[in-house]
Image (cartoon, rainbow, N blue to C red):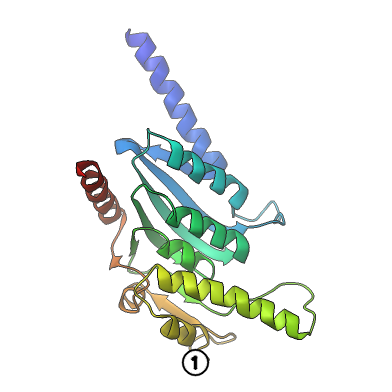
């Protein structure tokens, strides 16, 4: 029996290592799934192999499996991302927001650009004291056709982001748009950088805290859900 238990434990540890190596994901004790959003969020086009990326085609099926699993009670999302593909980022944010299980996010180094909707998509959010969030207008790489339709497309995409963030945080749409178009903070770009308490003060994030705070909050939410 002892050997069987040791073999099972070794197999579980192997699965944990492989999950972290392949997808930056692992299921913690207390039936909590850890999802990390790291580096650049990759969309329909593959980024160079030397880039640290979060692939949305990996994350979406995983979130669907979490929703369907009776073995997972809650989700902790760790973020340290520079942003990336807008459509992919919004898809991840919408999936997280639609989970029926308790969710908590924790912004570590930063959650910039399209990382902002992901950070606010959870039921409750934290940011460390030195964590940053950058809000700026939608950018597009590559050739841009100078036509009214192109402007309309950018405007619609920007409106979708503003609407989602305002709908999942305490920040108003008007205030978010003002932060997005600020010309006095970022040296070479429009937008605003919020550090720690600033993100809480602006209503984007619920609270300043670290991993222990995030897990404690998630445990409480899970217990409350089970009590219902």
Helix, strand or loop for disc 1: loop
Q: Residues within 10 Å of mark 1 (few under 14, many from 20)?
A: few
Residue at 47 percent across and 51 percent down: it is 36
Q: Tell me if I can see residue 164 in this picture.
A: yes
Which residue matches tag 1?
184
Residue at 50 percent across and 77 percent down: it is 135
> Could you tell me residue 187's position as x and y percent?
55, 87
Which quadrant, please, contains the N terminus? top left
Q: How many marks?
A: 1
State whether residue 64 is above or below residue 188: above
Residue at 24 percent across and 41 percent down: it is 226
> Could you tell me residue 205's position as x and y percent?
35, 69
In the image as oriented, which residue stretches furthest toward the left? 227
90 lies left or right of 9: right
> Could you tell me residue 19's position as x and y percent?
51, 37
Residue at 60 percent across and 54 percent down: it is 52
Q: Please tell me which residue lies in front, 144 or 22.
A: 144
Residue 32 occupies quadrant = top left
Which quadrant, please, contains the C terminus? top left
Residue 5 occupies quadrant = top left
């Amino acid at each position: 029996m002892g050997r069987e238990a040791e073999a099972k434990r070794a197999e579980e540890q192997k699965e944990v290592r492989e999950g972290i190596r392949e997808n930056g994901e692992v299921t913690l004790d207390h039936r909590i799934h850890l999802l990390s959003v790291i580096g650049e969020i990759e969309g329909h086009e593959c980024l160079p192999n030397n880039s640290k990326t979060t692939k949305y085609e990996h994350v979406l099926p995983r979130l669907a499996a979490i929703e369907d699993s009776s073995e997972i009670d809650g989700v902790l999302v760790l973020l340290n991302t520079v942003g990336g593909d807008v459509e992919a980022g919004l898809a991840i944010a919408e999936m997280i927001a639609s989970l029926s299980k308790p969710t908590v996010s924790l912004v570590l180094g930063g959650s910039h650009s399209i990382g902002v909707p992901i950070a606010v998509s959870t039921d409750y959010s934290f940011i460390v004291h030195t964590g940053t969030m950058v809000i700026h207008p939608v950018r597009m790489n590559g050739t841009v056709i100078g036509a009214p339709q192109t402007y309309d497309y950018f405007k619609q995409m920007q409106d979708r982001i503003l609407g989602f963030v305002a709908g999942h945080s305490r920040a108003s749409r008007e205030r978010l748009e003002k932060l997005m178009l600020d010309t006095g903070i970022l040296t070479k770009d429009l937008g605003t950088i919020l550090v720690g308490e600033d993100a809480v003060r602006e209503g984007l994030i619920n609270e300043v805290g670290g991993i222990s705070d995030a897990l404690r909050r998630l445990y409480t939410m899970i217990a409350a859900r089970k009590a219902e």
